[in-house]
Amino acid sequence: MDAVRLWSLSSSHPLKQLIRTTTTRLVIRCCSSSSTRTAPKPGGRGRRLSTSTSTSDKDAVRAIRLNKVQELRSKGLEPYAYSWERTHSANQLQDIYKHLGNGEESKPENDGVSIAGRIVARRAFGKLAFLTLRDDSGTIQLYCEKERLADDQFDQLKSLVDIGDIVGATGSIKRTEKGELSVYVNSFAVLTKSLLPLPDKYHGLTDVDKRYRQRYVDMIANPEVADVFRKRAKVVSEIRKTVESFGFIEVETPVLQGAAGGAEARPFVTYHNSLGRDLYLRIATELHLKRMLVGGFEKVYEIGRIFRNEGISTRHNPEFTTIEMYEAYSDYESMMNMTEEIVTRCALAVHGKLTLDYQGVEIYLERPWRRETMHNLVKEATGITFNELGNDLQVAKEVTLKNLGADLDYKYKSSIEACSSIGHLLNEVFEIVVEPKLVQPTFVLDYPIEISPLAKPHRRHAGLTERFELFICGRELANAFSELTDPMDQRRRLEEQVRQHNEKRAAAISGIDSAEDKREETDESYEVTLDDDFLTALEYGMPPASGMGLGIDRLVMLLTNSASIRDVIAFPVLKIQQQ
Amino acid sequence: MAAEESTLHLEELRRLRSMAQHPRIINLLSSEISSLEQDQSPPPQEARTAAEEANQKYYENRLNYIGTLDNPYPHESSVSRTISEYVKEYEGLLKDQRGVHLEDITESLAGMVMKQRSSGPGCFFYDLCGNGARVQIYASASNSELDESEFLRVHSNVKRGDIVNVTGFPGKTKSGQISIFARSFVVLAPCLHMMPVVNPMKTEGTDWSPGRPRNPETYSLKDQVETPILNTVAGGATARPFITKHNELNMQLYMRIAPKLYLKQLVVGGIERVFEISKQFRNEGIDLTHNPEFTTCEFYQAYADYTRMMELTEEMLSGMVKELTGGYKIMYHSNGLDQDPIEIDFTPPFRRIDMIEELNNLANLNINPEDLFSEEANNELKIACSMYGIQCPPPETTTRLLDKLVGHFLEEQCVNPTFIINHPEIMSPLAKWHRSRPGLTERFELFVNKHELCNGYTELNNPIVQRQRFANQLKDRQSGDDEAMPLDEGFCRALEYGLPPTGGVGIGIDRLCMLLTDSLNIKEVIPFPTMKPQDQPSARPS
């Protein structure tokens, strides 16, 4: 009404403006290029080409049923009725007449019932037909005899009613000889003619895409969905309680940063208008939390959203939630205890017990969890003793390839070939061979220095760092170090990281130039800059400390038995809708 | 115009025409539609599956039905207890009894209708569900306040998914089912789409109700939830968003400026009390009270209105001040650390100022809220601003002019916590229209030390009105106000499933911390505020 006033008063052509400004939104919302391109069949009904493979079957069914619609109309029957007066639901009848014996019939004059619902099964014989009708309370059989029905209703039933139709029926109640409670039908009507065959599981919302796009419907239709989000709230609250009971203080560090550091990942880039500069969305909270330690806080944590400009999968969403925590004057051993504490408390809060089922596998969370070095795990799985391989990378690769056997996937072979150091090689073998086997909770200790630029060198083993990752169900759940506090060493390692990245990037860019690839950007095409401000902070002096990061989405997946990260994020990032 | 694009326009136009009520608009739209249709050869057919058509038909029927009602989205709702409290209470009281009615007791419940059945035109049964619990409603014409035909009209139009409010007496049916026997039965928010049937395959037993957790006693009433920061539309507030790009999906994303629209979707989904404490991002200048990223707490409560939310806000803030300082008064160096501090008094209740009434008084204006959409009103406000020497940088939209006037005349008085209430519709696209004063909305803003600290509404839950409000916002966008709110189709669709009457509040945590720590600069309460790059000391004069 106010809109009306707006339009009629506006001086220029209001509608054009209205529509024009909505264009960008519309393109995002209904980017239906495929349907608009393929749809116009001259003169024909532009029914969308369904994504289903059985499109032609569906079309045939539809055509046949449309004829039935015509036929019903020609008999003066409306295939899309306005209403139907029901006396009972299917379940009520099952309940009221549960004492009716086999073969017994209720008195038709006393027990006239009227019912409506969808036909989900149908068997027809010469003068007898059985239909199964389902309403939202349950199912009941319709027992249809030619003699009972008026005029040619029985023939109509046989020829014009299909599975999927919504029908209404009246009659009395009879239990068949086989014990099936039935409505002994004396009249029926098609209330809604269904034009398409029912999907296998027509009941409820099973369209995965719609589940994520219209989560609220999903939550109403699928009870366990709302349940996941209540549990998620419970997990986050339990984590807070646990770390706060140990004296950690919650802080908030920036999402928008001048340089994205603390991990290796492609960041999102945005632009701040009034500052006139690019800003990166954080890829980790690590470097700012360490600055808090420099500033004098001794126990800090942040539960925060992290952003990585990477693909979407069952384990990856571009934005996800982690807890990172840092404790001064402690080392990675104490963080292992902390991690056990957090995960077990959350499991108890959600399940009340420490044995859980994850996708059919029993997981035992009783402490203590297994703690084993990466070297030993690799040795256990492959027989290779990396300590004894020496420093010749080429020899090490040959030994590894020989050991892993000839039937190793090509993808893995080439990633082994591409390793730039013994440390990378060890990690590669670990990821290929060991990771998937770490089903029960396992702390993997002492990672090579080459792949751990923020961790302190191991106090006893050269070339290694004091670092662990927690694996459950073959998935990394947590990552922790004794933090590197030597500013000179830190600078060297970060510079090396930038150098390596730029090398890869240069290689990738030249590759694109020669191949004229359509995809302009590859994984390495983003820029990595040194966070000088962080290095300056270290130069002021950071106390010895340990730090740990834990993926909350993955923890919730584990504790709610969810297969995909999208099941534990209320509104996951989705591709632009292709309808 | 590319064919695809005009197809999209056509769809949008048709949709608008289906919503339009004024004949002139319908004519305009119709002529635009036919001219567009001629541009396209062959004319594109609506490509829809039968299921989509059925859904569309259902939707249209529901729209038609609610079009016949005076107010399909009433403001008033009353809830005496939650469904689970009710069931617990009367299960205990009526243990092992059947067919008893406690007609002296009156209770009010609210929730979503999931199952419905009727045993004749004078008697309807419903399953009422809310926050994990369910109870039966027994509605009979004999108990109802309505006459029989009216009773039948109301109940024959109740659909699964409707949010309803029922008042009546407790009891048990003959079969021993705990029920509420309805004296009054009001639909608060009709569900306009087919609500899918609860999926029975995965539930334990068939007696599931929406949102019921497996271990109800282990959950608190309010659930902290997390909603996305990266959005395809930046909605829920009026501000310029940050834009970024997802490379692999080749998709432009906005960083959220408010979590509001998602939290309201969760209320639609059955989580009746939600909150989120989280970062918001606004691509705006940096000053003493603004940082591009800042933290808010937003909370929503189904079946509450803005009056209740104002009380809650009062309770929360005054309680917090009391807890932290031991009293209700704080000292704040509002004029600088070298000056004497001022006293800010958080003793509840806080003062309330009616926005337009007070503005008319103080500025000697004659604003009629019903006329604010007109050019005349816009001109009058321009004149008023220049008369009082109030600068309004272009675009001079009515909303922005009003905002400046309110800033000048009203916010200046708000040193102690003060609610400015009942904003005009034109300023509040997401707030529900005022139940008794046309042109206004049920909204409040809380100002402390002349700065906005909280913003709350009775949430708009009528999808048709919501779409019109978004359309009005478009006018401001066209006049160059890139902070006006864009249409969020997904959100409108969620409303069509039925949002219960809901109250919502957002609180700025950083500004609250400033007050409670006597900090004059927002940078004092953010450990790592956004700074200008050091190598360009004067990046760009703004």
Image (tube, rainbow, N blue to C red):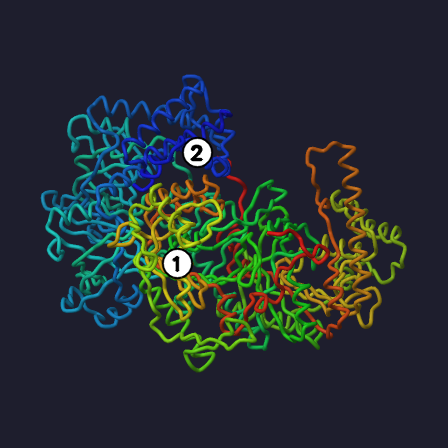
The residue lying at 67 percent from left, 75 percent from top is: A296
The residue lying at 77 percent from left, 41 percent from top is: A508
The residue lying at 25 percent from left, 30 percent from top is: A79
Q: Could you say whether the residue bearing mark 2 is in a helix, strand or loop?
A: helix
Q: CA distance from mark 2 to mark 1?
A: 38 Å
Disc 2 residue type (three-letter): Gln
Chain under label 1? B
Q: Relative to residue B2, is residue B377 drawn left or right?
A: left
Up-down relation of residue A168 to residue B315 (above or below): above
**Percent position (x, y) of residue B113?**
28, 53
Q: Which residue does the numbered mark 2 point to in the structure image?
A: A17
Q: Kindly indicate the quadrant of the structure image that contains residue A12.
A: top left
Up-down relation of residue A335 to residue B389 (above or below): below
Disc 1 residue type (three-letter): Ile
Q: Relative to residue A484, is residue B378 drawn left or right?
A: left
Q: Count the marks.
A: 2
Quadrant containing the N terminus of chain A in the rendered view: top left
Q: Could you say whether the residue bearing mark 1 is in a helix, strand or loop?
A: loop
Chain under label 2? A
Q: Kindly indicate the quadrant of the structure image that contains residue B452.
A: bottom left
**Percent position (x, y) of residue B255?**
54, 51
Instruction: Tell me the mark number nearer the camera, choosing from 2 and 1.
Output: 2
Up-down relation of residue B301 to residue A271 (above or below): below
Viewer-proximal residue among A89 and B163: B163
Q: In this rendering, does residue A122 appear at all?
A: no
The residue lying at 81 percent from left, 72 percent from top is: A459
Q: Which residue does the numbered mark 1 point to in the structure image?
A: B271
**Percent position (x, y) of residue B403?**
41, 54
Label 2 packing within 10 angstroms: few (<14), some (14-19), many (20+): few
